[in-house]
Image (cartoon, helix red, strand yellow):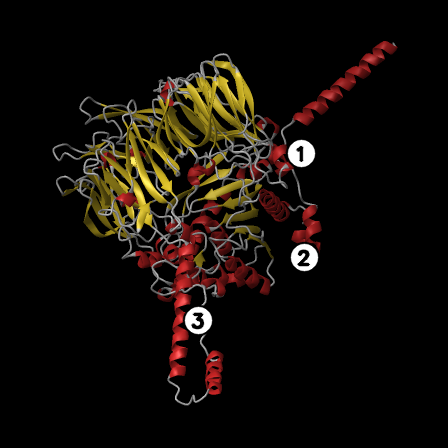
Amino acid sequence: MMKKRMIYVFAAFLLIFNSYAQEEKAPKPMDWKDIPSWKSISTNSVKISPDGKWMAYAMLQVEGDGELIIKKTDDPEYKKTYKVGSSSFVNMAFSDDSKWIAFKEYPTEKEKKANEKAKKPLSEKVILLNLTDEKKTEFDKVSNFSFNGETSSHLALNLTKEGTNGDAKGSDLLLVKLATGVKQNMGNVLEFSFNKTGTHLAYTVDAANQSGNGIYLMNVSNGTTQVLDSDAASYKSINWTEKGDAFALLKLVKDKKFKQDQGKIIGVKSLTNPQVTLYDPLKDSINFSKDYTISPNRRPQWSEDLSKLFYGIHPLILAKKEDEKSNKKVNEDSVKKAEAEKLAKIMADSSIKSISDLQKAIAKADSSKTKPTSSSDDLTKPDMTIWHWQDARLQSRQQVLENQDKNYSFWAMFDLKSSKHTALQDSSMKELSLMPKEKYALGADLSAYELDINLDGQNYRDIYIVDLSTGEKKMLFEKFYLPSYSSFPRSSPDGTKMMYGLDGHYYIFDLVKGTKTNITESLPTTFVDIEDDHNVTKPLHGSLGWSHDSNYVLLRDGWDIWQVPLNPKEKAINLTKNGKAEKIRYQTRFVLDDEEKGYDWRKAQYFRTYGEKSKKSGIVKIDPSKSGLQAGVKTLIWEDANINRFSKAKSADVFYFTREKFNKPTEFFLTDSQISKQTQISENTPDAENYLWSSGAKLIDYISDKGDSLQGALFLPATYQEGKKYPTIIYYYEKLSQTLHNYNAPGFSGTGWNPNIYTSNGYAVFIPDIVYTMDDPGMSAVWCVLPGVKEAIKSGVIDESRMGLHGHSWGGYQTSFLITQTDMFKAAAAGAPLTNMISMYDLIYWNSGGGNMSIFEASQGRFKGAPWENWESYQRNSPVYHVKNVKTPLLMLHNDKDGAVDFTQGIEYYNALRRLKKPVIMVQYKGENHGLSKLENRKDYSVRMMEFFDHHLKGTEAPDWIASGVDKLKLEEHLETRVFINN
């Protein structure tokens, strides 16, 4: 009997235990404290091997240690995991023969935190893995690494420099033979680089006292090394040609007369029997100005035909010692002059009759003598700036660009056949790019328009072409208008033609013939972006580039893709046909070959598609006919998801793409050229099942108050029940309904916002589109957001009595304005908002140093003219002038070092609300910019913003900082109680 009773008790215990265990395993809302340990795939750390048989991806933590996962593409059961330490990115590479992978292992989170006070550089490892037998080899203290290209026989590792070795900048380079593991060490290597095939290794040595400094070339197959040039100099910027048959670099020699080194250019070709060209400007008194030298700030390069070397030059600046010597000489001269003047004055004094009179005259001259000019070290100079109304760039902008301006270099070339140096540009044409094949260069100059560009935002350039056979410069277009950079000239792959946009059309300029042709005027469509609501004239949709043979261009009209021939006898073809009719946007072409030079119209091409109304996305394949003039479009995938990143293994017909939804993380799928099969290979967010996620998304169609057909994305809360209404956050930033299927990884953003955390915690999130009417950016939000919210309420999801607003920057402006126009919302959070459009117009965008004028008149501000020309519009759309209407409690984030929206904008609004005793709280993180960068600040504000909404929209008790604020003397204690770290 006792035995049976024990069995019953044990059985009951098991039931209770199982019930408890199941309850423990039930998914829960994600708390901010769960995020530090959150694991997810770093999508920029995903690689497929060249043969398509292996895929590697990094699984990283927000705060913690990550892993590298390696999988076989043909074996779903194969999975190997390797530790990679704590990092937001993992540096990895497959060998070209796909037999090896090398990757970085970083210090652990624990090691980093232990080192926070010491602040000593922590070393990184490189792991070399043989994919055939899984043998792992570790290399400590490695700064960078590289396989030797196509040959795949060696791995080179530049070791971290340790300690001091005089003035040596180089460190050990370890060359590992992959087949045997044999290592070769080369000391004091500063730079190294393999050519494309991997047959040769070029490296520079930088040793103590410059002993043995030089450029070295190793034949990797037999290990022989040649010293190509050696001197008491620094060698840097090795740059191989694309084919790998030659390379160029710089040789820099110190010159005490100048602040910069004297530069020389070295070109090496014919690798089996190297031919070394050394151009020394100091020996060229005819063509090279003595006031210039070759610059270290631009990598030199060969022309494709190896007939020319291109490099940068910049002015020389006298060293400080020379300045001091000059000052000293000036001072000595001034003393001598003063003494001579004194002597002449005494000798001319006729009142001197005795030795006593002479002594008195000398004493008088000494007491009244003028102090000679002092050296610059003896003077205390003012620390000041002169702002002049004719400055093309604001002084603040000049300060931001000071180092860039100091380090700017002009293109120049050296022709090997004529042994002649030619400067290709100067300060009258500071923009220059070498065109393919190096027959011409494209130049641009804005100096005549820079002041006006910075004032009203309308962009102009003088466009030049430089003939690289002679260096001759010729102006093609004067005051060329750039409503967007889609209009900027773009070279053909053969370097003889340019495509550019002008007055709403695309043109081709033939550089050889000197002719220009309008290639779109006869087409039954427009390539003007008519949806662009900025104050610019006829901005064009961006082109998709040239064909490889320079005979065709691909253009977008916003919907369809057109293949437009340069030959007037051929007709342009609408390749996609159904875009405009079915509201499908053919957006981008997937480039499957990183080395292509233009698309090959004879081969199939792949494009991403997006449904403007449906929000579906997919991939289509366009197969041209043999003539290349007709094409067939095949839809390969078209889903209610975000389909993206279609790629191909380098040497095999193995493809992969990504798929994600708002509540489903990004996953990678293996497929073929037809996407006829889909095999998921990644396993993202392994802890996702422990938490609650949004139940899905709805698309809300609505009409703005101005008659625009718009949409909004409504994300359902976790555990959504139809018929039940939920507290809702409305978020916006211009048009964002296209993010309906975008996954947002849990994390601490710089703005405190993460929609997946909110939906996990029972909020609905609604994101409506905003389009803009000129001169009414604030009212445009009213006309678009409020109708969208009203329509979304009809879905039955949103509790209209518990709605909150949130936006950051321009979205923060919309928030601060909306609460002056409506009482619909119970709470609002505005990050770094513009609040006074009149005062903001004349302030500075400190991050760039430029003025806000151009932003207001031609960019996001969307005003016509300045405030004094359009006062009523600026005032009508400024939140601060309607502040008396505010009834909505506001949480505002604004930082004292905000370099985009000046801190005074937040102060103006806060003080106006405070003066009226409106419920406003402003949080300021000292030293932070436009968004929060420090992790501790991102954590803190994320929690505070949710606490603010929880109180106002869910009725939770207000924490002290919301209820009554925090006195300065109690702030430290308050902050200490709120700190949380990864458990």
Q: Position of residue 427 (x, y in %)?
A: 29, 52
Nearer to the camera, 635 or 979 = 979
Q: Position of residue 753 (x, y in %)?
A: 54, 43
723 to 944, vertically: above or below: above
783 to 549, vertically: above or below: below
Other-residue count near label 3 (Cα within 10 Å), few / some / many at <14 / 14–19 / ≥20 = some
Q: Amino acid at mark 2?
A: Lys
Q: Which residue is mark 1?
A: 983
Q: SS for tag 1?
A: loop
Measure the alpha-carbon separation of dots 2 and 1: 30 Å
Q: SS for tag 3?
A: loop
Nearer to the camera, 525 or 253 = 253
Q: Which residue is mark 3?
A: 372
Measure the alpha-carbon separation of dots 3 and 2: 55 Å
Q: Earlier in the sequence, mark 3 or mark 2?
A: 3
Measure the alpha-carbon separation of dots 1 and 3: 70 Å
Residue 968: mark in rendering: 2
